[in-house]
Amino acid sequence: ERPLIERPFAACLRQMSNPCTEAFAETTSLSVPSVKSKSLGMLCLLLNIFLPGSGTLVSGLLEDRPSTMVVGAFQFVLSWIIIGWIWSVWWGYLIYVAAKEKESFEPLGEQA
């Protein structure tokens, strides 16, 4: 029998990067996900205003970015001391701006 560390799942875990490190890098560089439309960006902003971190989680799920989901979780946890709520609103605004810029620069033939 192979030791636990040699099982395929353990090998997969060793290859994964650290989402907390990626979340820190994402936050310090203000690298927000660019959701597909301006309306989704507005939804993420509104969710972040009324339930801190939820809009960030949604954008992370939509763009398949685990580090963004970690940022959303941190925003939610820190929201009770107001810092997380401010961070969440700011992040929601940045997501909306990124979506608005992406939508305005898309060629007409590529819109869905």
Image (spheres, rainbow, N blue to C red):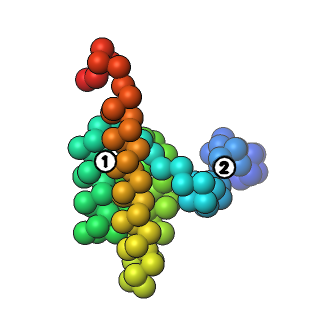
* Residue at 30% in and 54% down: 44
Q: Residues within 10 Å of mark 1 (few under 14, many from 20)?
A: many
Q: Which of the numbered marks, if any, corresponds to residue 17?
A: 2
Numbered-mark total: 2
* 66 with respect to 103 (left or right): right
Which quadrant of the structure image shows residue 91?
A: bottom left
Residue 52 numbered tag: none
Q: From this viewpoint, which residue is outermost toward the bottom?
A: 81
What percent of the width, then of the height, locates residue 48?
32, 63
Q: Is residue 23 visible?
A: no
Task: Residue 79 in the image: state x and y as whole percent.
Answer: 39, 77
Residue sitting at x 30%, y 57%: 45
Secondary structure at numbered mark 2:
loop
| For residue 101, above or below residue 92 | above
Closest to the observer, 55 or 106: 106
- Which residue is disc 1 drawn over? 41
Residue drawn 23% across the image and 44% down it: 39
Residue at 74%, 51% (x, y): give it.
Answer: 5
Of 102 and 62, the residue lying toward us: 102
Residue at the top extreme of this rendering = 109
Few, some or many residues within 10 Å of mark 2 (<14, 14–19, 20+): few
Name the residue nearer the viewer: 58 or 89.
89
Q: Quadrant of the C terminus?
A: top left
Residue 7 in the image: state x and y as whole percent: 69, 45
Q: Amino acid at mark 1?
A: Gly
Q: Position of residue 8 (x, y in %)?
A: 66, 41
SS type, badge 1:
helix
